[in-house]
Image: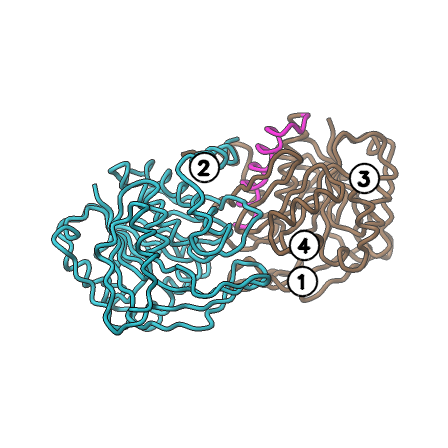
Chain colours: A brown, B cyan
Amino acid sequence: MSLLVVGSVALDSVETPTRRRDDVLGGSAVFFSYAARFFSPVYLLGAVGEDWPAEHTRMLRDRGIDTTGLQVIPGGKTFRWRGKYMPNMNDRETLEVHLNVLETFDPVLSPELRKAKFLFLANGTPALQTKVLDQIDAPELVVADTMDLWINIQRDELLRVLRRIDGLVLNDCEAKLLAGDENLVRAGQAVRKMGPKFVILKKGEHGAMFFGEHETYVLPAFPTPDVIDPTGAGDSFAGAMMGYLTEQGNFEPATLKQAMAYGIVVASFTVEDFSLDRLQKISRPEIDRRMAEYHRMMSF
Amino acid sequence: MSLLVVGSVALDSVETPTRRRDDVLGGSAVFFSYAARFFSPVYLLGAVGEDWPAEHTRMLRDRGIDTTGLQVIPGGKTFRWRGKYMPNMNDRETLEVHLNVLETFDPVLSPELRKAKFLFLANGTPALQTKVLDQIDAPELVVADTMDLWINIQRDELLRVLRRIDGLVLNDCEAKLLAGDENLVRAGQAVRKMGPKFVILKKGEHGAMFFGEHETYVLPAFPTPDVIDPTGAGDSFAGAMMGYLTEQGNFEPATLKQAMAYGIVVASFTVEDFSLDRLQKISRPEIDRRMAEYHRMMSF
């Protein structure tokens, strides 16, 4: 089994009520692949510019992430995002976005990547997601993320993508927007009827909801008092989830629920520091210890 | 074992984005006692005015709630609340409050009520909660609710109450306000250090969090697509929880968690119609069926 993620590789600048960091390692594909690697090998497909510090690529590669699909665009600049978190650390404001190399990023899958069985399309234009879907050979499981921007300005293209994927992961507000319904349960069910076999709503500090054909459930977030920077929580949630599914080699209902729980647990580590700083300090045993605690928390 | 609730008995007027009801049966003590009665006998202490429809008292009594402590104040008017829910059905605006008889409500416990072993002080002034605490003989478990108003204008009186109770139930925003901390986990732990042995934060559609000396946990809300009117969800949560604890006759950690889960399940019924309308259509087997579903939802 092999797992491929296509998404952004970024330099993030983050402001929180008490701290600030500039130009730290970020991007959906980075958080995703780092979280996935706790469970399975992962291939990263993305693009950066000439300003990209090579040490980041080395670090990812040293941790077992296959970065041969990470193109350095000559003369290009790396995607940059600057955001500011509100005091509740759940809501944020985007202060700056510089798409840079992502503006013209044209994902080309090598013969090896085309054979990936598990595929995650991180947030990106529906056109870009479609290009990847057109190249992949015979994936067993395709899951995608999206955002309010594409729901608002490329709805039809997005709806076509939804009919070609198995699972969709998106934020609660985005699901409400896409479904036109303020009730999360109805919104999740409505989005599922747009095509995906399952839909997962990310609710930030309130956890995640699952909508399948035969079941709907909610899993709360793991309650951590040490929220330093929530950036990447959603992408590392998806990474751990897909990594676990790849490790298990199936996506049966019971495996999916376990995978979501792993996603929640890994995301709870992500928010405990900036960038990948917290994730770089843990390994599978810490994750499994917190997973046991999470499991206990919900047993009654 | 016996359970006593002291709180408001009201005529509510509720506006939602699509519906509206005027002067329906409501109030914290009413939702609480109706939810509690699925599990144990309950005594209701409160006051209404001469405008109070006697049929409401008859209905409560017919359902096994002891209403001998419900005083009808001569010349008085019943407490009235009018509120409007936002499209997300989680946030609301209070449009009108008429305290009426609650302005001078002086709770007097009969010799029988003084012997209650389980006591719930629904939201009310700290002075009123103190008066009840001064009269009760030897309660085994006292749990109270409060609100932002008292946190803002009677903080010292409230802090004195917190040192005399075993448990506090309050909304997430109120806990943040009381603790002066926007992180829910830290806020809950801080409030617990103000006196109560345990603190339960109600998060509306996102469930509830528990903070004890040795454990912190979150239970998600039961996901219902049929949210008609959330009024009384918090009070029926507390009622089912306290009713179950009274039925079990203890408040060991495992019993408390089970009790919270029952609270969440009963609250999910409450929101499915206005006033007590949905609760009046169910009995213990429906609750236990949904409880089994809730349990399954969180098993992985």
Cβ atoms under marks 4 and 3 closer than 8 Å = no
Foreground mark, 1 or 2, reads 2
Residue corresponding to mark 2 = B286
Q: Residue at x 68, y 25 (%)?
A: A249
Q: Residue at x 24, y 38 (%)?
A: B249
Amino acid type for the residue under numbered disc 1: Arg
Instruction: Identify the main secondary structure in magenta.
Output: helix
Indicate the chain on which mark 3 is placed. A
Marks 3 and 1 sit apart, C-alpha to C-alpha, by 32 Å
Amino acid type for the residue under numbered disc 2: Glu
> With B68 as the anchor, is B198 left or right in this view?
right
Residue corresponding to mark 4 = A174
Residue A11 seen by the camera:
no
Amino acid type for the residue under numbered disc 4: Glu
The quarter in which the C terminus of chain A is drawn is: top left
Q: Secondary structure at mark 1?
A: strand
Foreground mark, 2 or 3, reads 2
Measuring from the top left, give residue A38's x and y in whole percent: 61, 34
Magenta residues, as a range? A249-272
Compare residues A169 and B119 and report the one nearer the observer. B119
Amino acid type for the residue under numbered disc 3: Arg
